[in-house]
Image: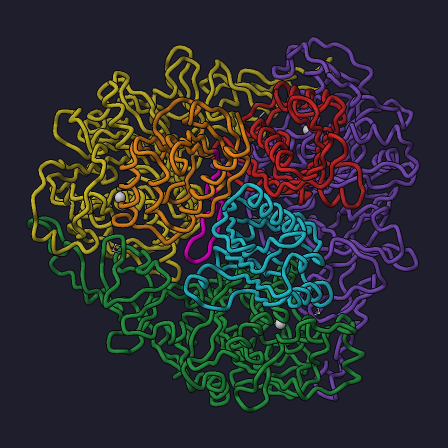
Chain colours: A cyan, B orange, C red, D green, E yellow, F purple
Amino acid sequence: MFDIATQLAVERLLARYVRCIDEDLLEEWPGFFTAECRYQIIARENYERNLPIGVFFANSRAMLQDRVTALRQANVYVAQRYRHLVSSTLLLDRRDDTVTAQSNFQVTRIMQDGATALFSTGRYLDQIVLAGPEPLFAEKLVICDSRRIDTLLAMPL
Amino acid sequence: MFDIATQLAVERLLARYVRCIDEDLLEEWPGFFTAECRYQIIARENYERNLPIGVFFANSRAMLQDRVTALRQANVYVAQRYRHLVSSTLLLDRRDDTVTAQSNFQVTRIMQDGATALFSTGRYLDQIVLAGPEPLFAEKLVICDSRRIDTLLAMPL
Amino acid sequence: MFDIATQLAVERLLARYVRCIDEDLLEEWPGFFTAECRYQIIARENYERNLPIGVFFANSRAMLQDRVTALRQANVYVAQRYRHLVSSTLLLDRRDDTVTAQSNFQVTRIMQDGATALFSTGRYLDQIVLAGPEPLFAEKLVICDSRRIDTLLAMPL
Amino acid sequence: MRDLNLAWPIEGVTRVPYELYAREDVYAEERRRIFMGATWSFLCLEAEIAAPGDYRATFVGDVPVIVARDLDGTLSAFENRCAHRGALICHKDRGNGARISCVYHSWTYDLRGNLTAVPFQHGVNGKGGMPEDFRREDHKRRSLRVESLAGIVFGTFAAETPPLATYLGPEIAARVKRVLPRPIKVLGTSSQILPNNWKLYIENVKDPYHASLLHTFFTTFRVNRLSARGGIVIDDSGGHHVSFSMMATDRASADYDQADIRSRQEGFRLADPSILAGRDEFGDGITLQILSIFPSFIVQQIQNCLCVRQVVPRGIAETELIWTYYGFADDDAEIASMRLKQSNLVGPGGYVSMEDGAVGSLVQRGIVGAGRDSEVIEMGGREFKSQETRATESPLRGFWSAYRTHMRL
Amino acid sequence: MRDLNLAWPIEGVTRVPYELYAREDVYAEERRRIFMGATWSFLCLEAEIAAPGDYRATFVGDVPVIVARDLDGTLSAFENRCAHRGALICHKDRGNGARISCVYHSWTYDLRGNLTAVPFQHGVNGKGGMPEDFRREDHKRRSLRVESLAGIVFGTFAAETPPLATYLGPEIAARVKRVLPRPIKVLGTSSQILPNNWKLYIENVKDPYHASLLHTFFTTFRVNRLSARGGIVIDDSGGHHVSFSMMATDRASADYDQADIRSRQEGFRLADPSILAGRDEFGDGITLQILSIFPSFIVQQIQNCLCVRQVVPRGIAETELIWTYYGFADDDAEIASMRLKQSNLVGPGGYVSMEDGAVGSLVQRGIVGAGRDSEVIEMGGREFKSQETRATESPLRGFWSAYRTHMRL
Amino acid sequence: MRDLNLAWPIEGVTRVPYELYAREDVYAEERRRIFMGATWSFLCLEAEIAAPGDYRATFVGDVPVIVARDLDGTLSAFENRCAHRGALICHKDRGNGARISCVYHSWTYDLRGNLTAVPFQHGVNGKGGMPEDFRREDHKRRSLRVESLAGIVFGTFAAETPPLATYLGPEIAARVKRVLPRPIKVLGTSSQILPNNWKLYIENVKDPYHASLLHTFFTTFRVNRLSARGGIVIDDSGGHHVSFSMMATDRASADYDQADIRSRQEGFRLADPSILAGRDEFGDGITLQILSIFPSFIVQQIQNCLCVRQVVPRGIAETELIWTYYGFADDDAEIASMRLKQSNLVGPGGYVSMEDGAVGSLVQRGIVGAGRDSEVIEMGGREFKSQETRATESPLRGFWSAYRTHMRL
Ligand code: FES
Ligand code: FES
Ligand code: FES
Ligand SMILES: [Fe+3]
Ligand SMILES: [Fe+3]
Ligand SMILES: [Fe+3]
């Protein structure tokens, strides 16, 4: 069930996903999701208490596209970049061509002036569809360990 | 000797191990070790000078169980969680069905109020027994780079 | 093209590379490069604006050896160690036996007194030659996210 | 009492000295005169301590406080500092029980802050223990007067603070009740650490002027205009305010189109407009209501996204902003989904709020070297009064007027 | 000398103003009057500088100091600040040699702090160099008086400090020697960064009252009771103390069983009791001895786990606590294993010590907004004197009495 | 104006009180009297704002400033703080345009700091807006006088500052022009966060004495000697200096060989000496020139590696050091490669500069507990004057003399 090829396919998807964000290729970001996807950034505190509202929610790829458009065209924030570290990717379950995977992540934020700080840690809880040329996220839950966000959250995690 | 399957089996063991701690499933933690195991958390400074005493020592799975019982029943500390990042797992040696592996780790600590800080970095030096349904740690040395512990160390690393 | 064996060979090279630095085996460090190599530590800010000068540059293995000699024999700095975390290694391209790979990295610095701090984050952009017994770096670009260096940079990243 | 030796500019509330954001002694005085003074602070929502015996650790300014619902249902609050040697009595975020014990030596309190038990008070085997004349009654924790309005629990340390209704005035109270007409439930929490003085965030909240200029989401996607109908209400003290508007009734405006620079981009449309689908749940057409209560509490309605914001100072240049989203106990699935999607508009990463997290730090960084320089707050005139326009900074002048009164500046 | 303008409560040492933990000026005065004043501070163990030429960088309070064993075996100590332009003379943790050179300009010192070499003192090629009247003798580093007791090296900056034996008094000195009867070896080191004022940790160490209430490991696993036989010894100055007990002699106690809330869980047993296997190595049945020396040093025996603790202030709200575990040069394998296993009881993650790392920060956080409020330290009476019970805070009153004397408060 | 109540030692500039590195009030006075006083600060290189409309955010001391090239090519600079409510007008590192808008409320400025637009100044639909008597002209940003020397842009806040040429004096100015004879291009930037007071880094830069003693790269690889021919130039104010040498002309020196301890290792040779391949591009044989301009700017030539260093204070114990490497617009490939390889000598990880990043923090840590103690700066005598030797601290005495004048100490 947890074959090596699947493990590496999932790890590669995650590697491509974080590169897309860290190298500021946000326009490609929605393309990592299925059209009918679910993406949410939520603090563990809310997630464990079954409270629905977190920091960002989308239930369509179009909403992710709107996020990118807003960041590029509408929202104002001091220039910044992320650096993701992802580790300990675990395949938890598999149904047909959909795999459930969990990974630990850490995001460091680097401001334009060089100020660098640990920005967020947590885990990805992903539903990944393996059919098709490249694997896609049908669901991506970004469960942050802390409810705190330093200053603001603009780019996706 | 360093075949792909072994590499991934070791990485998967480490992923399950850190998930157990990070998701607060401490009751399962002793189960990652053999009955006659050795587990120690020790600062590099002591380790390199061959000084025996570190922060925690156990030479039986029962002592690990006692640690969990104490944390759950006796010890008092402000609610907190860890997030592990593990990388650069290297198979160093193999004797029969026992593999020696080293990995780099970092633990971030998240307090109940959301305060997040880098808590510990170092390397795991593991003796892993591959026989049996799941690999187990016969020995796990947690060599912390720093002798300093912020406030206290309750949960295992 | 992106076969599992190559992925793991590259990850293993990176694991051995960071172990060499983190365990203070600097004398072995030049051995990870081809004789005619290129190694540079440069801030993203300079890299993206095509400015040539960063923090350290070498275009021969001999220059790397000189760096080690200088650190061991000439330069003075307060005792310190690094801990690397490497993740999301992506094979980007392959020509004959040379692979282009990118990885995210984070370096934590631990001072002799135990003070621990996030030191640098960024990405490795590597040209790796797979011919020969062990893979070697023909080129290693260490692109730091921040232009800032805390206090000084002595050991390689 | 320390003298701040701070001369307010003769222009009055249209000038605010930048040193108010950078001086430790000012910060300490604010704790004493404002947060522990004659003001009402948000403690929690009743829904968070719904059951008898529920309690929460919260803050009044940066002072730790416990707020609880006693076994008989009455609300109470007292300082979260042990009478013995000063430890936090409650180090947990929340709990339930008839008693709270300090972990250090298990001195135990009831939910009104009465000291009910002192281990070994009478010694062990006849040895040790507290002196004969030690009376637990002498060590009751300093309690706060508590009042609840429409499910929001407020507390004050000062005896002289007027009743909450008087403090708020009828208009503000009515506007609070408007968005809390029936039992609520908490839908989520998040917080922001703002690298700036707490008053810079309060200024931002009370500032209708920046809305369409800083937040261009609505204009970029052609949804809203500053010229939407609405207005500003300010209470007599100046400390509280309401800013509201009706998005539907948008009209073009020459002034507007000339004025704004950044929000004039055109041609963008939402690929998924479902985020804007809403309901006029309060039946008055008001789609946005921002309400602030002096010194540091905000109630917000943006369409169907409802939340309260608690502002917690963490030092002269750090502030925690805590968002608590709520809905109503009887929410149906459709409105639940609307609230969830509209929550993307606000919070730490909200389309029309994320900028607010950054501007405070731009000011905090901008005032280095400002010396005795001060802000210029003249948009909409020089007094503070309710107005029909959002092209005003009237609520800021109101805030600074109330601030000066409490700080005696 | 600055006036702290701090009025001590009329109740005396049973009341300690919380501002002592939060004021920068108090911290600076403590450095001057206590750590650099008429007190003895731990510098290192002789075993750490066993060989001629060995030296270590250490701290007196937060002041950097070098302690060394000269080539002739004598111990010395001097400030770790270069006479030239103030760099740390020794930036390494430890070293060995007849001389120590500052890295900046290689000014060189012997192990007594004498300036022995100044590069280019007489110029280069007849140019430059120090003035003719420059005398290296004028720049000897300020040295500390050093005394060693049972292998522990102490130092003091002040001429008026009495001899160590007088400072400690016979009873304390005897108790120190008790756990250091013969040559030792270091078994390990670790440290904790405590987010609180140094005095809050000292209070914790001197507080027998919290032991069974905060640390419930022994009671949870049914190993110990507060009512175990033991007692408290305090010297005449009040600054030093010893708390000891004999675990074996446990007796039930009604007072006890009523008192404690948290430690009444039952039914737990150690799956691997080998951690408790010990030896009465000092032949007096005492299984626990905590000894503190004013201002900031602790010697501890818990069964066969022996260690010293150095408390290093790092600011008003940060303290480093350095644990050094030791055994004896002639330890056999069995006792070595006992010390290793019992080390799980103490240190940053110890079963009966980890809570001590947290309570100080609970106080530091609890006193925000405390203003002129103060601690209540009345357990066991209002004076400080040796007592047979551990239901007392006598040693704290002793500490504050000594503190007031040194601080002239 | 605050009185620092700081008595300078009677010995004068040969003694520098350590408290100058540790007092907040001293830091604040330095901002006022030195950085915003009668001094010239580096703003940027002309090459960084080469095109009309180019602007950069920079700092004078720690005060945010915008430096720009107006559309007509003239250079200007003004404080980077909005006239409205104090936000940074420019939060970007650099930009281009005729106008700069503050993001908060879009108040807009031209490149001279004139306030050119205030959104809704006249209200919206006849409501709100600024008072009738509001004049944008009254809110021009405080501008700096700007002068450019050899492509380096300097600015000053103070009217009384003499012209740049007068301020520098002919000799310093000539030495600046020497390394900037024709159009340059920027080759790279990096920065260091130094955990020490800014003056400790300036002392280091002005200190010829430490060069061969602290930096042993050249001696270890047998490339250089302190005895290489060279000298020190100091201007009349004492605040500026040049240190230069000619590496080729190395001669053995008994004094030298005796003096240095650390740099006497022998037998090492570069495996790849190409790093040292250089060109006498200025035709005068000078291979090293370090030039400092009071208070906080450095121009450096090491062989063919050219750069400027801006020192930005970030608090009493933190300093940012910004390195900008440059070459000439007409560089050929060979010299480009030389500059690249020689850049390994300097910067945050440079072979002969990395130690400078550490010594400041060794001093900052060394002076804890120093009280009223002070540095001893007597190498090369007790005055400051130009000298032919590098065995001197003359430039430091010059710096402190200028410092005392500006600080009135
Ligand atoms: S401090 Fe709370 S019981 Fe002692
Ligand atoms: S500072 Fe120590 S030798 Fe100069
Ligand atoms: S603060 Fe700049 S426009 Fe308002
Ligand atoms: Fe806003
Ligand atoms: Fe304790
Ligand atoms: Fe130098």
User: Quarter holding the C terminus of chain F?
Assistant: top right
Identify which residue, D202 or E129, lies in the foreground. D202
Residue F245 locus on image (x, y percent): 80, 23
- The quarter holding residue A75 reads bottom right
- The quarter holding residue F282 reads top right
Left or right: where F274 falls relative to A3: right
Image region (quadrant) for ligand 1: bottom left
Q: Is residue F383 visible?
A: no
User: Quarter holding the N terminus of chain F?
Assistant: bottom right
Judged from this view, the residue extending furthest toward the front is A96
Query: Which span of residues is magenta-colored?
Result: B107-123
Residue D408 locus on image (x, y percent): 49, 73
Residue E4 locus on image (x, y percent): 40, 51
Magenta: predominant secondary structure element?
A: strand
Left or right: where D358 falls relative to E250: right
- Kindly identify the residue that appears in the image at 14 percent across and 39 percent down: E231
Number of disc labels: 0
The question of residue F282 being in magenta is answered with no
Left or right: where E265 falls relative to C73: left
The question of residue B121 being in magenta is answered with yes
- Kindly identify the residue that appears in the image at 50 percent across and 57 percent down: A143
Residue F11 locus on image (x, y percent): 60, 32
User: Can you say whether F384 is above or below F97 in the image?
Assistant: above
Identify which residue, B133 or D105, lies in the foreground. B133
Q: Is residue E134 visible?
A: yes
Left or right: where D132 falls relative to F158: left
User: Can you say whether D198 is above or below F219 in the image?
Assistant: below
Identify which residue, F31 or E359, lies in the foreground. E359
